[in-house]
Amino acid sequence: MDHVAHRSLSMSLPNILTYGRIVAVPVLAGVLFFGTSEATRWLAFAIFVVACITDWLDGYLARIWEQQSNLGRMLDPIADKLLVGATLLMLVYKDTIGGWSIWAALIILAREILVSGLREFLAELNVKVHVTQLAKWKTAVQFIALAMLLAGPAAEDLMPGATMTGVILLWIAAFLTLVTGYDYLKAGIRHAIYR
């Protein structure tokens, strides 16, 4: 593939959606850091939900339009991890995630870092660990939990128990995170020892 084709793929709609998701991270963090009203909570919720939709949409469009690229494959998981990590940190900062639930947030963050390192190690060995259906469910539960926690206090009037539901889903996501992270760890240890 020549340089012109590479350049055109770098500015394809799927990649632009991924860039947008990365840009949304500091915007979301800024809204939560500086905002104190219920309106800012709803704004943060809206930014997060749109970012989550682009996570599904960029991959879908790249496949149906045959615009998959190395740049997209590299940036997509980075964008996801930045979004999840920054949202968790800001929710802890805002005291929406507190007490024992901080451990659920730590499990999710630790898993993301572990998987990133293992993916890099396995890629050097040309080993692919395919995304399982359970891992997709983990991502969905994680996104729903974080969205509910972002709306949290502002959503209580419309949906009593919204924050508690978000916390419960966060713990479920943390459990699924451990299970799915084990697949990567097992593959990494197996190739580290036997290769």
Image (spheres, grey):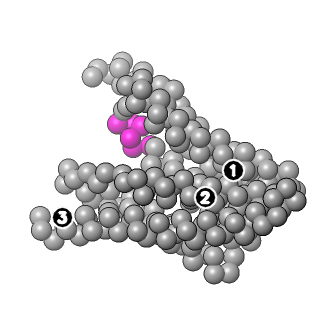
C-beta proximity under 8 Å, tags 1 and 2: yes
In the rendering, which numbered label is found on residue 100? none
Which of the two residues, 165 or 95, is positioned nearer the viewer here? 165
In the rendering, which numbered label is found on residue 28? 1
Quarter of the image with the C terminus in it: bottom left
The amino acid type, in three-letter code, at marker 1 is Leu
Distance from disc 1 to disc 2, alpha carbons, whole Å, reads: 8 Å
Query: Element at badge 1?
Result: helix
Quarter of the image with the N terminus in it: top left
Q: Which residue is mark 2?
A: 86
Is residue 58 something that shows in the picture? yes
Which of the two residues, 49 or 35, is positioned nearer the viewer here? 49
In the picture provided, is 29 more to the left or to the right than 20?
right
In the picture provided, is 1 more to the left or to the right than 81?
left
Callout 2 environment at 10 Å: few (<14), some (14 to 19), or many (20+)? some
6 w.r.t. 126: above or below:
above
What residue is drawn where x is 20% and y is 50%?
A: 126
Magenta-drawn stretch, dominant element (helix, strand or loop): helix
Which of the two residues, 162 or 121, is positioned nearer the viewer here? 162
The amino acid type, in three-letter code, at marker 3 is His
Q: Which residue is mark 3?
A: 191
The amino acid type, in three-letter code, at marker 2 is Ala
Is residue 114 something that shows in the picture? no
What residue is drawn where x is 71% and y is 61%?
A: 149
| Residue segment shown in magenta | 70-75
Query: Element at badge 3?
Result: helix
